[in-house]
Image (tube, rainbow, N blue to C red):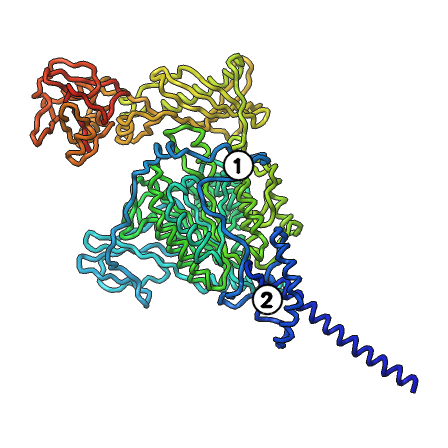
Amino acid sequence: MHTEGKRRGSWIERKAMAVIFTIFAIFIVSFIVFTYGNFDDNKAEFSFQKYVLTKNWTYIQEQKEKADEILENNKNAIKKDNPIEPSYPLNLIENDSPDPTQKFLMKTPPFSQKISVNSKNLKCWPEKFGFSKSQADAVYDPSISFSPCPESTPFIYINENNQLVMNCSDSPKYALGSYPFEEELGRHSIFFLWFDYFNPVKLEDIEYAFGKCGSKTQTILANRPKDEFKNRANNRKKEILTQKNLSDTRAITVIMLIMDSVSREHFYRNFPLTVKFLNENLVNGKYSEDFIGYDFKFNHAHGNTTISNIVPIMYGHNLTTHEKLTEGWSYKRNEDSTIYGQLQESHALWTFFRNQGFVTFFGFDTIYDFLSKVTSRSVLTDHILTNFWLFAERVFYYKDWSTKQQCFDNHNAHYYMMDYLLQFVKNYEKTNKFAYAHISPGHEDTGTVIRTVDPDLKEFLEKMFNLHKNNGEDLALFVLGDHGKSAKLTDVEEKRYELFLPMHLLFANKRLIERLKADEILKHNSDRITSRIDWYLTMKHLAVSQYEDISKDSSLYIEWKSKLPSSSHSLLLEKTPDSTTCDDLGISPEFCLCSVYTDIYPEDFKKQNYLSMLAGFAIKYLNKHTEHQPAREFCKELNFYKIWHGKELTISPQKIQYKFDMNLKQDPDTVFEIIGIIEKIERLPFDFDDKPTKFFDKDELTSQKYIIELISVIRKNAPLSFCVEIAKEIEINAENCICKIPDMFNKRLFNQPMLQMYDRLRERLTLAVSEYGVSCADTCKEIKKNCQLWGLQMLNSIDMWNEPWYEDNSYYLYKNGARTVFKDLQIEQYSSGNVLGFDQERIFYYVEPKMLSCEVSDDLVMGLCPCE
């Protein structure tokens, strides 16, 4: 009995212990669920997940009440910026509909051109970020605006049978685009032919076509999803999930929208609608609960060209390394496309994403060979949009360097790339997607056509946010510049900052950022120097983020970093140290905005000699641009007069970069800033070729060998407006020309091409005669035209008006509706004055060229006013 009682007691004790342990376990599990659940920032209430571990709601409520005190402690910890764990497991795919109680603490900072960063402890921080408003207004005319493309009724569409259909009764014609396998990057031949339209045309795999109805032309562009790509991506994803023993994960869309030649400052100057939309809807408003944005203020370019920046962000190494890897290859040789493809397979981001279970897209709206020089013409993505722009050149006369707005019927040219991206995202819903899309309206010289992108970018962002608000997918959308906008007519220092500080924005859904625990890190890094290779690593991090919780100590992450510059890191994972420099990130000193030049003193004759070498090379470079006809008839042959303000930057003991100002004998008031490199070498590289900007030299006294390279030759003051117009006509860069003023021309110098050019300029002008005391600006306004300063400069010579090279004078003057031939004025003498014109005494007045102005008047002179 005693033994049996002991056994019964032991059983009761074990039963009691089991009950106590069960209660304790339930409490612990509930505590974990609640502690790591979601909460409202204002109310601090738990949001219960649908997969709670018990059906006993009353019991759970009791457990919730016991955890309130713990919750309050968590609130205080959050306010202290302590890290918070994700609100759901890495491998959990949630219901597609949003959880109305799900709240995120993270907020989007306001988007503002003004930068407020405490840079006191930062080792590398730029002194400025670009042009002042007055400088920018002088270079990029703020008065230029663009209207929407004219609306029209579509007469070309694709029906449900995948046929091209035209609704046109005026001689309808059509042209089909390329098949997908024919898509190539850059300048190459295409098959283009207009066909008469009679019946619907089967399109097969073709994604775009063009139609002509009378004088009107239209295009249609449609992304065609393929089960082959979708199945491959989803099967690869399942394979990785199985290998890692994970459940299904949310699909993620990663998009890189590259805007060519847009600095951060240029973005804020030219995208007011987009900035307003972001501040009203993302910082606050309807998208602020679900999405977040980051503006990276010190995103440092690796060079001043597209390829010098896209190579590191897409391949993970700088352009010099890439050129060594591709030495002896040519993008123009079809037989080399295989080895270029192998390099893409081993390094390019799009193939990395493909291997992680993504459908991929590449698009570039260029008709020239920019990026193709480093990728070859073949890009290894699932979808490619490149030939479309070559067809558009034939149909709409498209040029990606055009200084005019380019409409393809009722949409701007860049719209079609954005629209294709949206189709691509919609068509591969629930599948991982990676896209690289490059648009070029910022590439042209005036810097104003980029303004046409503003309303379309606003609409694109709104549609992208709407797509991802309820589709159960993650989004990481990057909007960035490859490099900033270069400008040539203003101070070089500001120009340099604009050039090397491209814009870089990141938009993402908050759920993704919270899962990666990246908000605080991203906000920190948005105020620090970032490099293209940092972004390369960040992209790789995103590609694997659905499969692996990457940490700084992950073997995979350590392996990635071992092949990159020492301080490169994922901007989602590591904070950029305050001590980071350009050198740490693999940015060359010659491009680094934190590099410090030291003065060269006049008594340092050796270095002064180096400056003279560069000056001579710069003069040779400038003269080379104007040695052909007809440029040499208009441009003076140049000789340098004096060197000013010499400075140096040591890149290595054998390689020094110099910067100095230089003026010319032909025009001492014109100043060029020269930046160049002189490198001492022991022997000339076997593959070295002289270029217009790079050559070999040897000191005859010391036998020292040098490679001399010009980095930039930039005119610091603007050429005459007349010279700019002449340069456009003869297709040269006006800044390379010190032009001869009109009174230097005579009958002997005027050859037929020059006469034709002057005739074209003169035909653009209406020559009005002002009243006494009335300026040309006001006189031209009266006939609803504008006074042209270049016209005053061109006509500021009695010989130009008398036209001795013509038998009959062709200058007709208009005043009060009456027309007079200039020679009928019977000018007897001429003299200098304040206004270009004549008086009642038959005296012709000319003006010192630099004093000419449309705004000046003279009470004793009737102005000769060139109006256009």
State whether residue 101 appears in this view.
yes
Image quarter (top left, top right, bottom left or bottom right) of the C terminus: top left
Identify which amino acid the numbered label 1 is placed on: Thr
Q: In screen coordinates, is 61 left or right of 197?
A: right
Q: Amino acid at mark 2?
A: Ser
Dot 1 corresponds to which residue?
Answer: 320
Q: Position of residue 326 (x, y in %)?
A: 51, 40
Whole-percent x and y of residue 431?
49, 62
- State the SS at label 2: loop
Judge by depth and name the residue closer to the eye, 363 or 148.
148
Q: Between 693 and 596, which is closer to the camera in this rendering?
A: 596
Question: Tags 1 and 2 in contact by the CB under 8 Å rule?
Answer: no
User: Mark 1 Cα within 10 Å, few/some/many (few <14, many 20+)?
Assistant: few
Please identify the quadrant where the N terminus is shown: bottom right
Q: Nearer the viewer, residue 520 or 572?
A: 520
In the displayed structure, 513 sits above or below 567; it is below
Left or right position of 707 against 773: right
Residue at 16% in and 30% down? 779
Give the total of numbered labels: 2
Crowding at dot 2, Cα within 10 Å, few <14 / some 14-19 / many 20+, comes out as: few
Q: CA distance from mark 1 to mark 2?
A: 43 Å
- Between 569 and 493, which is closer to the camera in this rendering? 493
Horizontally, residue 775 falls left or right of residue 56, namely left
Quadrant of res 568: top right
| Residue beneath disc 2 | 247
Would you place residue 766 above or below residue 315 in this image?
A: above
Nearer-N-terminus badge (1/2): 2
Rendered location of residue 734, percent (x, y)? 32, 28
